Image (cartoon, rainbow, N blue to C red):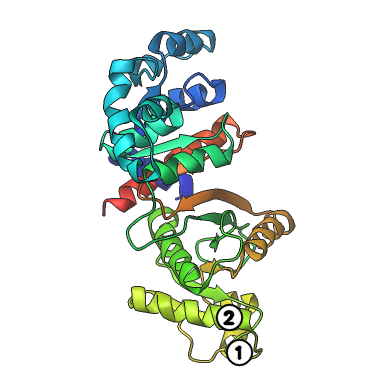
């Protein structure tokens, strides 16, 4: 079964409460109509119900009226969320007047609904810059306990003639958020990416901490960071199959793994690659995407207290549907 076929079935079996704050954006409405029709999620739109339904009518959509609607222009609706936001941000000096204004922003209101237990996940970004989406998530939801960084993973869907990875998949991180993580942050990225491998890719994670050195073949402070991060990750999750430092060929090619890292439980068999910096991760996923003709699902944001994913402003309707499916599966995985 292909990745999105499986993820769709999982979402349909356990529908999550999905919040869409960009409620009159045409591609978002078209994606939501498909999601509602196929019973993938219970959708809440943040916006004026009449405006949303009029836009849906213009687009010829027949399922939007089945969603829930929360109007940020209604002061009585916004007030309890404003009170919550003022409490969350009081150490930053936020007044209730400031909170009322910010809570009426659909991005913030969506995150506040999740914070109050009225939603499970949010997808935005078709209209909003990434910085605006992430700022709302950071300020309201924050990161998971014990996690200080948010990172971005990609599931690389490899052509059938490529013999690496597992089920024609490799998971890469961080490719989107943290420019130069320290050892503690890199360990957290590894742990969260292993969750993505398990909950989204459906694989038992085999994690390689990548470097330009394999088991002491080179010495440098950047190699030391990867070695330290590997040990921290092992301490956080002793059951996780993880090893490092490993060069990328030693991580995924069995013969090279056996030669360069004999006895390693990971070398030659990794399905999850953790890169030491954003530049290496970003370069790697784009090269694999273009040179191998691989699909790239992501970025899947990891580490937030609840799933929030950011769309490219150039996203297609299919892209939005797929992001919603992934986000719902993150919410399902977080509850396990």
Residue at 60%, 34% in the rendered image? 315
Q: Is residue 45 above or below residue 215?
A: above
Task: Give the percent coordinates (x, y) of residue 21.
Answer: 44, 27
Q: Is residue 138 above or below residue 70?
A: below
Which is nearer the eye, 312 or 92?
Answer: 92
Residue indicated by mark 2: 246
Q: Which mark is residue 209?
A: none
* Horizontal side of residue 309 vs 89, given as left or right: right
Quadrant position of residue 218: bottom right
Which secondary structure lies at badge 2? strand
Q: Residues within 10 Å of mark 2 (few under 14, many from 20)?
A: many
For the residues bearing labels 1 and 2, Cβ distance under 8 angstroms: yes
Task: Tell which circle, 1 or 2, labels the residue nearer the N-terminal end.
Answer: 2
Which is nearer the eye, 182 or 313?
Answer: 182
Quadrant position of residue 92: top left
Residue 63 visible at all: no
Task: Give the percent coordinates (x, y) of residue 35.
Answer: 42, 29
Residue indicated by mark 1: 260
Residue at 28%, 41% in the rendered image? 14
Q: Is residue 77 above or below residue 125?
A: above
Quadrant location, the C terminus? bottom left
Q: Residues within 10 Å of mark 1 (few under 14, many from 20)?
A: many
Task: Give the percent coordinates (x, y) of residue 67.
Answer: 34, 21
Residue at 70%, 59% in the rendered image? 292
């Amino acid at each position: 079964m292909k990745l999105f076929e499986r993820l769709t079935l999982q979402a349909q079996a356990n529908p999550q409460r999905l919040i869409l704050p960009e409620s009159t954006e045409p591609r978002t409405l078209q994606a939501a109509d498909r999601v509602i029709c196929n019973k993938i999620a219970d959708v809440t739109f943040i916006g004026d119900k009449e405006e949303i339904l009029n836009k849906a009518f213009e687009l010829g959509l027949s399922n939007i009226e089945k969603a829930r609607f929360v109007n940020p222009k209604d002061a009585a609706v916004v007030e309890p969320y404003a009170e919550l936001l003022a409490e969350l941000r009081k150490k930053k000096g936020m007044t209730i007047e400031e909170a009322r204004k910010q809570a009426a922003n659909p991005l913030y209101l969506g995150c506040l609904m999740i914070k109050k237990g009225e939603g499970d996940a949010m997808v935005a970004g078709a209209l909003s810059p990434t910085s605006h989406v992430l700022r709302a998530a950071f300020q309201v939801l924050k990161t998971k306990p014990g996690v200080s960084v948010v990172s971005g993973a990609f599931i690389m869907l490899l052509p059938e003639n490529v013999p690496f990875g597992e089920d024609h998949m490799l998971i890469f991180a961080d490719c989107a958020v943290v420019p130069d993580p320290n050892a503690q942050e890199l360990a957290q990225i590894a742990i969260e990416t292993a969750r993505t491998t398990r909950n989204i890719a459906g694989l038992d994670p085999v994690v390689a901490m990548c470097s330009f050195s394999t088991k002491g073949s080179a010495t440098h402070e950047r190699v030391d960071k990867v070695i330290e991060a590997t040990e921290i990750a092992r301490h956080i999750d002793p059951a996780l199959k993880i090893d490092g430092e490993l060069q990328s060929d030693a991580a995924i090619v069995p013969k090279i793994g056996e030669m360069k890292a004999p006895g390693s439980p990971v070398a030659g068999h990794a399905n999850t690659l953790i890169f030491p910096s954003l530049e290496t991760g970003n370069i790697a996923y784009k090269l694999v995407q273009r040179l191998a003709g691989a699909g790239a699902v992501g970025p899947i944001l990891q580490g937030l207290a609840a799933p929030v994913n950011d769309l490219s402003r150039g996203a297609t309707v299919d892209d939005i549907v797929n992001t919603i499916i992934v986000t719902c599966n993150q919410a399902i995985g977080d509850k396990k």
